[in-house]
Amino acid sequence: MSHETIYQSLFVQTRGELRRELTAHLRTGRVARGTKGRSEKIGKLKGMMPISARPAEADDRAVPGHWEGDLLLGGIGKGQIITLVERTSRFVLLAPLNTSRNAADTREQLTRIIARLPLELRKSLTWDQGREMAQHAEFTLATGMPVFFCDPHSPWQRGSNENTNGLLRQYWPKGADLRHVTQDECDAIALRLNTRPRQSLGWKTPAQALNQGLLATTG
């Protein structure tokens, strides 16, 4: 039985008080099963490199340093959080983008995050085609980190990031006001996720997995 079958059973077959009791235990707390992804704004970004051009080592999670990124949105006009997930280890980096998600602000904050990383962990970034990444060329110039873009309406191409954003909704529910979230708060929540053992990592934590991967590649 797939996870989708279980969700559909909860949302379609249950009614009344039983439905309220069961859906209250879901991580997202939503009361309906919606489609994934978000609507894309009109217009393509200039100079995009498609995800099909991404190195094979990123696709098979062979070495650390390849990241997936997105914005976790608050309520309308209520800020957002930059979320980055390292593909091999599922290690998470978070940063507030409190007031605006225009291209300049996004590039500036992303550059600050990546500057915290050693060069060995700056291999690539995968993002969707949102207009907040219109200055991706400037970001690459500043960090040495190429940006690859997912196909339209294909959130599964950033599956690790999508899953992490779902986990983050425990701390920042949909509609939350994110305009006053600080970097310290982001770091504290990232620490919780990075020290949580994962079945997909053989019950290692993302922090442990990233450290092991980095040692293996640097000797």
Image (spheres, rainbow, N blue to C red):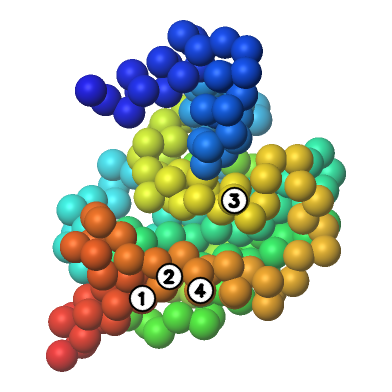
Label 3 and label 4: CA atoms lie apart by 14 Å
Of the numbered discs 1 and 4, the one sitting upstream in the chain is: 4
The total number of labels drawn is 4
- Kindly indicate whether the residue at mark 2 contacts the one at mark 4 (C-beta within 8 angstroms): yes
Query: Which amino acid type is shown beneath numbered disc 4?
Result: Leu
Residue 140: give x, y in percent of width and height: 49, 66
Q: What SS does tag 4 mark?
A: helix
**Residue under numbered circle 2:** 194
Report how far apart the C-alphas of labels 2 and 1 lie in the structure.
5 Å
| Labelled pair 2, 1 in contact (Cβ < 8 Å) | yes
Query: Looking at the picture, which amino acid does disc 2 mark?
Result: Asn
Q: For numbered disc 1, what is the local secondary structure? A: helix
Q: Earlier in the sequence, mark 3 or mark 1?
A: 3
Where residue 81 appears, as percent x and y from the top left, is 66, 57
Q: Tell us which disc is closer to us: 3 or 4.
A: 3
Mark 3 vs 4, N-terminal side: 3
Mark 4 lies on residue: 191
Looking at the picture, which amino acid does disc 3 mark? Gln
User: Which residue is tagged 1?
Assistant: 207
Q: Are marks 3 and 4 in contact (CB under 8 Å)?
A: no
